Amino acid sequence: MRVIGFFLFISLKGFIQARCLLKEISSDRMKKTIQLGLIFEFVALLFSTCTIRYPTSDESAVPVLSNLMVTKTLYLQSDIDYSLSVDVSDPQGLNDIETVIGFIYPLNQSASLWEDTLQDQGIEGDIIPGDGRFFRRFTVDFAEGQVGQYRLEVIANDRSSHQSNALLDTLTVVDDQKNFPPVLSHPFVADTLTEASLKNVFISVQVEDAYGKEDIDSVFFQIYPSFNPNFFLHYTLRDNGLNGDEVADDGIYSLLGDLSDTLRTIGIHLIRFQAIDQAGLISQPLVLYFYIEGINGPPVLSQLSIPDTVSRYAYLPFLISVRADDPQGLADVKKVYFNMINPDDTPFEYNPVPLYDDGNYGDQIPGDGLFSISVLMSSQTDKGIYQFRFFAEDYAQVISDSLTHRLTVVD
Protein backbone atom coordinates (compact mmCIF):
# COMPACT_ATOMS: atom_id res chain seq x y z
CA MET A 1 0.00 0.00 0.00
CA ARG A 2 2.93 2.35 0.64
CA VAL A 3 4.18 1.81 -2.92
CA ILE A 4 0.73 2.44 -4.39
CA GLY A 5 0.30 5.55 -2.20
CA PHE A 6 3.67 6.89 -3.37
CA PHE A 7 2.76 6.54 -7.04
CA LEU A 8 -0.68 8.00 -6.39
CA PHE A 9 1.00 11.00 -4.71
CA ILE A 10 3.34 11.52 -7.67
CA SER A 11 0.48 11.17 -10.13
CA LEU A 12 -1.80 13.55 -8.23
CA LYS A 13 1.01 16.10 -7.93
CA GLY A 14 1.61 16.00 -11.67
CA PHE A 15 -2.08 16.14 -12.31
CA ILE A 16 -2.43 19.32 -10.19
CA GLN A 17 0.49 20.95 -11.96
CA ALA A 18 -1.05 20.12 -15.30
CA ARG A 19 -4.34 21.66 -14.18
CA CYS A 20 -2.51 24.89 -13.45
CA LEU A 21 -1.00 24.90 -16.92
CA LEU A 22 -4.41 24.43 -18.44
CA LYS A 23 -5.49 27.81 -17.11
CA GLU A 24 -2.78 29.47 -19.18
CA ILE A 25 -3.88 27.79 -22.43
CA SER A 26 -6.55 29.71 -24.29
CA SER A 27 -7.45 27.06 -26.89
CA ASP A 28 -10.35 24.87 -25.75
CA ARG A 29 -9.35 22.13 -28.19
CA MET A 30 -5.82 22.02 -26.80
CA LYS A 31 -7.14 21.95 -23.24
CA LYS A 32 -9.34 18.92 -23.98
CA THR A 33 -6.43 17.07 -25.59
CA ILE A 34 -4.17 17.65 -22.59
CA GLN A 35 -6.94 16.67 -20.15
CA LEU A 36 -7.60 13.38 -21.99
CA GLY A 37 -3.87 12.59 -22.08
CA LEU A 38 -3.53 13.21 -18.37
CA ILE A 39 -6.41 10.88 -17.59
CA PHE A 40 -4.95 8.01 -19.68
CA GLU A 41 -1.49 8.51 -18.16
CA PHE A 42 -2.88 8.48 -14.64
CA VAL A 43 -4.93 5.30 -15.19
CA ALA A 44 -2.00 3.49 -16.89
CA LEU A 45 0.34 4.44 -14.06
CA LEU A 46 -2.13 3.27 -11.46
CA PHE A 47 -2.64 -0.19 -12.98
CA SER A 48 1.07 -0.68 -13.73
CA THR A 49 1.93 -0.28 -10.06
CA CYS A 50 -0.86 -2.34 -8.47
CA THR A 51 -0.58 -6.08 -7.75
CA ILE A 52 -3.84 -7.94 -7.28
CA ARG A 53 -3.62 -10.64 -4.60
CA TYR A 54 -6.30 -13.30 -4.39
CA PRO A 55 -7.13 -14.80 -1.01
CA THR A 56 -5.84 -18.33 -0.28
CA SER A 57 -7.40 -21.04 1.83
CA ASP A 58 -5.64 -23.35 4.29
CA GLU A 59 -6.85 -26.35 2.26
CA SER A 60 -4.31 -25.63 -0.49
CA ALA A 61 -1.43 -25.79 1.99
CA VAL A 62 -2.16 -29.06 3.81
CA PRO A 63 -0.24 -32.32 3.29
CA VAL A 64 -1.84 -34.97 1.08
CA LEU A 65 -1.74 -38.74 1.68
CA SER A 66 -2.29 -41.37 -1.03
CA ASN A 67 -1.57 -44.98 -1.98
CA LEU A 68 -1.85 -46.59 1.45
CA MET A 69 -0.39 -50.10 1.50
CA VAL A 70 -0.62 -52.47 4.46
CA THR A 71 -0.71 -56.20 5.19
CA LYS A 72 -4.41 -56.73 5.85
CA THR A 73 -4.40 -60.22 7.39
CA LEU A 74 -2.39 -60.65 10.60
CA TYR A 75 -1.63 -64.02 12.19
CA LEU A 76 -1.56 -64.54 15.95
CA GLN A 77 0.56 -67.70 15.68
CA SER A 78 3.27 -66.15 13.50
CA ASP A 79 5.95 -64.02 15.13
CA ILE A 80 6.58 -61.79 12.14
CA ASP A 81 6.63 -58.11 11.23
CA TYR A 82 4.09 -56.49 8.93
CA SER A 83 4.59 -53.45 6.71
CA LEU A 84 2.72 -50.15 6.48
CA SER A 85 3.55 -47.44 3.93
CA VAL A 86 1.97 -44.37 2.37
CA ASP A 87 2.83 -41.65 -0.17
CA VAL A 88 3.02 -38.13 1.31
CA SER A 89 3.14 -34.83 -0.57
CA ASP A 90 3.01 -31.20 0.55
CA PRO A 91 2.63 -27.94 -1.42
CA GLN A 92 5.62 -26.55 0.50
CA GLY A 93 7.74 -29.67 -0.09
CA LEU A 94 8.56 -32.71 2.02
CA ASN A 95 10.68 -30.60 4.38
CA ASP A 96 7.42 -29.10 5.61
CA ILE A 97 6.22 -32.50 6.91
CA GLU A 98 6.43 -32.68 10.69
CA THR A 99 5.05 -36.20 11.35
CA VAL A 100 3.28 -39.07 9.62
CA ILE A 101 1.44 -41.20 12.19
CA GLY A 102 -0.37 -44.50 12.06
CA PHE A 103 -3.09 -45.56 14.51
CA ILE A 104 -4.86 -48.89 15.06
CA TYR A 105 -8.26 -48.91 16.81
CA PRO A 106 -10.78 -51.57 17.69
CA LEU A 107 -13.54 -51.42 15.11
CA ASN A 108 -16.13 -48.74 16.02
CA GLN A 109 -14.07 -47.49 19.00
CA SER A 110 -12.03 -44.30 19.44
CA ALA A 111 -9.27 -45.41 21.84
CA SER A 112 -6.17 -46.45 19.88
CA LEU A 113 -4.37 -49.71 20.64
CA TRP A 114 -1.26 -48.81 18.64
CA GLU A 115 0.32 -45.54 17.54
CA ASP A 116 3.66 -44.96 15.83
CA THR A 117 5.37 -42.64 13.36
CA LEU A 118 6.24 -43.60 9.80
CA GLN A 119 9.60 -42.45 8.45
CA ASP A 120 11.26 -41.76 5.09
CA GLN A 121 14.95 -42.00 6.03
CA GLY A 122 15.94 -45.15 4.15
CA ILE A 123 16.24 -47.25 7.33
CA GLU A 124 14.20 -49.86 9.20
CA GLY A 125 12.57 -51.13 6.02
CA ASP A 126 12.22 -47.83 4.16
CA ILE A 127 13.94 -48.28 0.80
CA ILE A 128 14.69 -44.81 -0.61
CA PRO A 129 15.22 -41.86 1.74
CA GLY A 130 13.38 -38.66 0.90
CA ASP A 131 11.20 -40.13 -1.86
CA GLY A 132 7.93 -39.28 -0.11
CA ARG A 133 7.10 -42.90 0.66
CA PHE A 134 6.84 -43.23 4.47
CA PHE A 135 7.20 -46.67 6.03
CA ARG A 136 6.78 -48.47 9.36
CA ARG A 137 6.94 -52.08 10.52
CA PHE A 138 4.48 -53.32 13.14
CA THR A 139 3.44 -56.58 14.80
CA VAL A 140 0.16 -58.15 15.86
CA ASP A 141 0.95 -57.57 19.56
CA PHE A 142 -1.57 -54.71 19.71
CA ALA A 143 -4.41 -57.29 19.47
CA GLU A 144 -3.30 -58.98 22.72
CA GLY A 145 -4.45 -62.34 21.41
CA GLN A 146 -7.90 -61.12 20.33
CA VAL A 147 -9.08 -62.08 16.84
CA GLY A 148 -11.36 -59.81 14.84
CA GLN A 149 -11.28 -56.66 12.75
CA TYR A 150 -9.43 -53.45 13.57
CA ARG A 151 -9.39 -50.00 11.99
CA LEU A 152 -6.14 -48.52 10.66
CA GLU A 153 -5.81 -44.76 10.22
CA VAL A 154 -2.86 -42.74 8.89
CA ILE A 155 -2.51 -38.94 8.99
CA ALA A 156 0.25 -36.38 8.45
CA ASN A 157 0.93 -32.98 10.06
CA ASP A 158 3.08 -30.18 8.66
CA ARG A 159 5.16 -27.62 10.56
CA SER A 160 2.28 -25.16 10.55
CA SER A 161 0.02 -27.71 12.28
CA HIS A 162 -2.00 -28.36 9.13
CA GLN A 163 -3.38 -31.91 9.12
CA SER A 164 -3.70 -34.04 5.98
CA ASN A 165 -6.58 -36.12 4.80
CA ALA A 166 -6.90 -39.40 6.73
CA LEU A 167 -6.47 -42.74 4.98
CA LEU A 168 -8.32 -45.73 6.46
CA ASP A 169 -8.19 -49.49 6.07
CA THR A 170 -9.39 -52.58 7.91
CA LEU A 171 -7.06 -55.17 9.42
CA THR A 172 -8.19 -58.72 10.20
CA VAL A 173 -6.49 -60.68 12.98
CA VAL A 174 -6.86 -64.47 12.74
CA ASP A 175 -5.85 -67.29 15.08
CA ASP A 176 -3.67 -69.05 12.55
CA GLN A 177 -0.16 -69.30 11.19
CA LYS A 178 0.88 -67.42 8.06
CA ASN A 179 1.66 -69.65 5.11
CA PHE A 180 5.13 -69.22 3.67
CA PRO A 181 6.64 -70.85 0.58
CA PRO A 182 8.72 -73.99 1.12
CA VAL A 183 12.36 -73.44 2.05
CA LEU A 184 15.16 -75.36 0.33
CA SER A 185 18.58 -76.23 1.74
CA HIS A 186 21.51 -78.63 1.26
CA PRO A 187 21.25 -79.21 -2.50
CA PHE A 188 23.57 -81.88 -3.84
CA VAL A 189 24.97 -83.07 -7.15
CA ALA A 190 28.53 -84.21 -7.84
CA ASP A 191 30.85 -81.46 -9.04
CA THR A 192 32.00 -83.58 -11.98
CA LEU A 193 30.15 -86.31 -13.86
CA THR A 194 31.82 -88.76 -16.23
CA GLU A 195 30.40 -91.15 -18.79
CA ALA A 196 30.40 -93.87 -16.12
CA SER A 197 28.95 -91.80 -13.24
CA LEU A 198 26.15 -90.49 -15.45
CA LYS A 199 24.67 -93.97 -15.31
CA ASN A 200 24.30 -93.67 -11.53
CA VAL A 201 23.70 -90.00 -10.67
CA PHE A 202 22.58 -88.99 -7.17
CA ILE A 203 20.74 -85.66 -6.81
CA SER A 204 19.00 -84.39 -3.66
CA VAL A 205 17.71 -81.35 -1.79
CA GLN A 206 16.20 -80.80 1.66
CA VAL A 207 12.77 -79.13 1.88
CA GLU A 208 10.91 -77.62 4.84
CA ASP A 209 7.46 -76.03 5.03
CA ALA A 210 5.78 -73.99 7.79
CA TYR A 211 2.64 -76.15 7.49
CA GLY A 212 4.57 -79.41 7.52
CA LYS A 213 5.50 -81.99 4.90
CA GLU A 214 1.85 -82.51 3.96
CA ASP A 215 1.77 -78.98 2.53
CA ILE A 216 4.53 -79.73 -0.03
CA ASP A 217 3.02 -80.41 -3.44
CA SER A 218 6.13 -81.08 -5.52
CA VAL A 219 9.92 -80.75 -5.54
CA PHE A 220 11.81 -80.68 -8.81
CA PHE A 221 15.01 -79.71 -10.56
CA GLN A 222 15.82 -78.39 -14.03
CA ILE A 223 19.15 -78.71 -15.83
CA TYR A 224 20.45 -76.06 -18.22
CA PRO A 225 23.44 -76.27 -20.54
CA SER A 226 26.11 -73.58 -20.31
CA PHE A 227 24.96 -70.06 -21.23
CA ASN A 228 21.56 -71.33 -22.34
CA PRO A 229 18.33 -69.92 -20.84
CA ASN A 230 16.31 -73.00 -21.81
CA PHE A 231 16.40 -76.12 -19.64
CA PHE A 232 16.47 -79.50 -21.36
CA LEU A 233 15.65 -81.72 -18.36
CA HIS A 234 12.85 -81.33 -15.79
CA TYR A 235 12.64 -84.03 -13.12
CA THR A 236 10.46 -84.45 -10.01
CA LEU A 237 12.23 -85.56 -6.84
CA ARG A 238 10.58 -87.88 -4.25
CA ASP A 239 10.78 -88.45 -0.52
CA ASN A 240 9.21 -91.91 -0.53
CA GLY A 241 12.22 -94.16 0.07
CA LEU A 242 12.26 -95.31 -3.58
CA ASN A 243 14.38 -94.64 -6.70
CA GLY A 244 17.45 -93.73 -4.68
CA ASP A 245 15.71 -91.86 -1.88
CA GLU A 246 17.27 -93.37 1.23
CA VAL A 247 14.72 -92.58 3.97
CA ALA A 248 11.04 -91.90 3.35
CA ASP A 249 9.49 -88.73 4.83
CA ASP A 250 12.76 -87.33 6.19
CA GLY A 251 12.44 -84.08 4.21
CA ILE A 252 15.24 -85.00 1.78
CA TYR A 253 13.98 -85.39 -1.79
CA SER A 254 16.29 -87.50 -3.92
CA LEU A 255 17.00 -89.25 -7.21
CA LEU A 256 19.45 -92.04 -8.03
CA GLY A 257 19.24 -92.90 -11.70
CA ASP A 258 20.73 -93.20 -15.16
CA LEU A 259 20.90 -89.86 -16.96
CA SER A 260 23.48 -90.82 -19.54
CA ASP A 261 20.97 -90.66 -22.41
CA THR A 262 19.89 -87.16 -21.38
CA LEU A 263 23.09 -85.49 -20.16
CA ARG A 264 25.26 -85.88 -23.22
CA THR A 265 26.49 -82.29 -23.45
CA ILE A 266 30.10 -81.89 -22.32
CA GLY A 267 30.96 -78.86 -20.23
CA ILE A 268 29.49 -76.79 -17.39
CA HIS A 269 25.81 -77.25 -16.54
CA LEU A 270 23.44 -75.51 -14.15
CA ILE A 271 20.94 -77.38 -11.97
CA ARG A 272 18.08 -75.39 -10.42
CA PHE A 273 15.99 -76.74 -7.51
CA GLN A 274 12.53 -75.48 -6.51
CA ALA A 275 9.47 -76.62 -4.52
CA ILE A 276 5.75 -75.74 -4.62
CA ASP A 277 3.25 -76.04 -1.76
CA GLN A 278 -0.45 -76.89 -1.86
CA ALA A 279 -1.40 -73.21 -2.10
CA GLY A 280 0.82 -72.74 -5.14
CA LEU A 281 3.55 -70.79 -3.32
CA ILE A 282 6.93 -71.38 -4.95
CA SER A 283 10.18 -71.53 -3.03
CA GLN A 284 13.23 -69.45 -3.78
CA PRO A 285 15.45 -71.46 -6.15
CA LEU A 286 18.77 -73.02 -5.23
CA VAL A 287 21.37 -73.34 -7.97
CA LEU A 288 24.46 -75.53 -8.35
CA TYR A 289 26.93 -75.97 -11.19
CA PHE A 290 28.52 -79.23 -12.30
CA TYR A 291 30.81 -80.34 -15.10
CA ILE A 292 30.32 -83.24 -17.50
CA GLU A 293 33.50 -84.81 -18.81
CA GLY A 294 33.85 -86.72 -22.04
CA ILE A 295 35.19 -86.73 -25.56
CA ASN A 296 33.35 -83.96 -27.37
CA GLY A 297 32.34 -84.51 -30.97
CA PRO A 298 31.68 -81.51 -33.22
CA PRO A 299 28.23 -80.60 -34.57
CA VAL A 300 27.30 -81.88 -38.01
CA LEU A 301 25.35 -79.96 -40.69
CA SER A 302 23.16 -81.56 -43.36
CA GLN A 303 20.02 -81.06 -45.47
CA LEU A 304 20.92 -77.56 -46.63
CA SER A 305 18.04 -75.86 -48.44
CA ILE A 306 18.60 -72.56 -50.31
CA PRO A 307 17.63 -71.38 -53.80
CA ASP A 308 20.19 -71.34 -56.61
CA THR A 309 18.77 -68.19 -58.24
CA VAL A 310 16.71 -65.30 -56.88
CA SER A 311 15.25 -62.25 -58.67
CA ARG A 312 15.84 -58.97 -56.89
CA TYR A 313 12.48 -57.75 -58.23
CA ALA A 314 10.49 -60.75 -57.01
CA TYR A 315 9.62 -59.10 -53.68
CA LEU A 316 8.95 -62.53 -52.20
CA PRO A 317 10.80 -63.94 -49.19
CA PHE A 318 12.66 -67.22 -49.55
CA LEU A 319 13.67 -69.67 -46.84
CA ILE A 320 17.19 -70.79 -45.97
CA SER A 321 17.43 -73.83 -43.69
CA VAL A 322 19.95 -76.44 -42.58
CA ARG A 323 19.82 -79.34 -40.14
CA ALA A 324 22.25 -79.47 -37.20
CA ASP A 325 23.07 -82.57 -35.16
CA ASP A 326 25.54 -83.18 -32.37
CA PRO A 327 26.97 -86.40 -30.85
CA GLN A 328 26.12 -84.97 -27.42
CA GLY A 329 22.57 -84.15 -28.43
CA LEU A 330 20.76 -81.19 -29.95
CA ALA A 331 20.98 -79.33 -26.63
CA ASP A 332 24.75 -79.07 -27.16
CA VAL A 333 24.29 -76.99 -30.33
CA LYS A 334 24.95 -73.43 -29.26
CA LYS A 335 24.36 -71.67 -32.60
CA VAL A 336 24.03 -72.15 -36.35
CA TYR A 337 24.95 -69.35 -38.73
CA PHE A 338 26.28 -68.43 -42.16
CA ASN A 339 28.85 -65.99 -43.49
CA MET A 340 28.17 -64.44 -46.87
CA ILE A 341 30.62 -63.12 -49.49
CA ASN A 342 29.34 -60.42 -51.86
CA PRO A 343 29.84 -60.62 -55.67
CA ASP A 344 32.82 -58.24 -55.35
CA ASP A 345 34.49 -60.70 -52.92
CA THR A 346 33.93 -58.47 -49.87
CA PRO A 347 32.38 -59.97 -46.74
CA PHE A 348 28.76 -59.15 -45.96
CA GLU A 349 28.53 -56.26 -43.48
CA TYR A 350 26.37 -58.19 -41.00
CA ASN A 351 28.28 -61.49 -40.83
CA PRO A 352 27.72 -63.85 -39.12
CA VAL A 353 23.98 -64.21 -39.81
CA PRO A 354 22.19 -66.50 -37.29
CA LEU A 355 19.66 -69.19 -38.17
CA TYR A 356 16.91 -70.09 -35.71
CA ASP A 357 15.23 -73.20 -34.32
CA ASP A 358 12.74 -71.45 -32.03
CA GLY A 359 9.76 -71.01 -34.34
CA ASN A 360 10.69 -67.43 -35.26
CA TYR A 361 12.15 -65.61 -38.28
CA GLY A 362 10.81 -68.21 -40.71
CA ASP A 363 11.57 -71.30 -38.62
CA GLN A 364 8.49 -73.53 -38.68
CA ILE A 365 8.92 -76.04 -35.83
CA PRO A 366 10.90 -75.07 -32.73
CA GLY A 367 13.41 -77.56 -31.39
CA ASP A 368 13.34 -79.96 -34.37
CA GLY A 369 17.01 -79.43 -35.27
CA LEU A 370 16.19 -77.61 -38.50
CA PHE A 371 17.62 -74.08 -38.27
CA SER A 372 16.07 -71.51 -40.62
CA ILE A 373 15.78 -67.87 -41.60
CA SER A 374 13.48 -66.06 -44.02
CA VAL A 375 15.20 -63.63 -46.44
CA LEU A 376 13.72 -60.89 -48.65
CA MET A 377 15.84 -59.47 -51.46
CA SER A 378 15.64 -55.76 -52.23
CA SER A 379 15.63 -54.19 -55.67
CA GLN A 380 18.78 -52.40 -54.52
CA THR A 381 20.63 -55.70 -54.08
CA ASP A 382 23.58 -56.00 -56.44
CA LYS A 383 23.33 -58.61 -59.14
CA GLY A 384 25.88 -61.39 -59.15
CA ILE A 385 26.96 -64.54 -57.34
CA TYR A 386 26.82 -64.63 -53.53
CA GLN A 387 28.72 -67.30 -51.61
CA PHE A 388 27.23 -68.72 -48.38
CA ARG A 389 29.21 -70.75 -45.84
CA PHE A 390 27.22 -72.44 -43.04
CA PHE A 391 28.61 -73.42 -39.62
CA ALA A 392 27.40 -74.83 -36.29
CA GLU A 393 29.10 -74.37 -32.92
CA ASP A 394 28.60 -76.32 -29.69
CA TYR A 395 28.96 -75.22 -26.07
CA ALA A 396 32.55 -76.43 -25.99
CA GLN A 397 33.28 -73.90 -28.79
CA VAL A 398 33.86 -76.74 -31.27
CA ILE A 399 32.83 -75.72 -34.80
CA SER A 400 31.41 -78.04 -37.43
CA ASP A 401 32.68 -78.54 -40.94
CA SER A 402 31.16 -75.93 -43.24
CA LEU A 403 28.57 -76.31 -45.99
CA THR A 404 28.95 -73.97 -48.99
CA HIS A 405 26.39 -72.74 -51.50
CA ARG A 406 26.41 -70.18 -54.32
CA LEU A 407 23.31 -68.08 -54.96
CA THR A 408 22.90 -65.94 -58.07
CA VAL A 409 20.86 -62.72 -57.90
CA VAL A 410 19.34 -61.66 -61.24
CA ASP A 411 16.83 -59.07 -62.44
Image: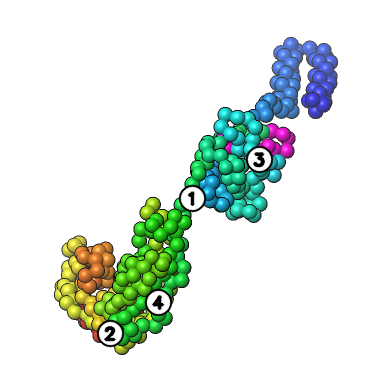
- Disc marking residue 189: 4
Spot the residue most to the bottom.
Answer: 295
The structure residue drawn at horizontal position 59% and vertical position 47%, both measured from the top left corner, is 139
Q: Nearer the viewer, mark 2 or mark 3?
A: 3
Q: Nearer the viewer, mark 2 or mark 1?
A: 1
- The amino acid marked with disc number 4 is Val
* Residue 374: % across, % down: 23, 66
Q: Quadrant of the N terminus?
A: top right
Q: Label 3 vs label 1: CA separation?
A: 24 Å
User: What SS does tag 4 mark?
Assistant: loop
- The amino acid marked with disc number 1 is Lys
Where are the magenta residues, as a range? 151-162
Q: Label 2 vs label 3: CA separation?
A: 70 Å
Q: Nearer the viewer, mark 1 or mark 4?
A: 1
Q: Is residue 266 left or right of residue 20?
A: left
Among the two numbered marks 1 and 4 on one chain, the one whose residue lies closer to the N terminus: 1
- Disc marking residue 178: 1
* Residue 285: % across, % down: 43, 65
Q: Nearer the viewer, mark 4 or mark 2?
A: 4
Q: Which image quadrant for residue 205? A: bottom left
> Compared to 31, does 363 lie above or below?
below
- Disc marking residue 298: 2
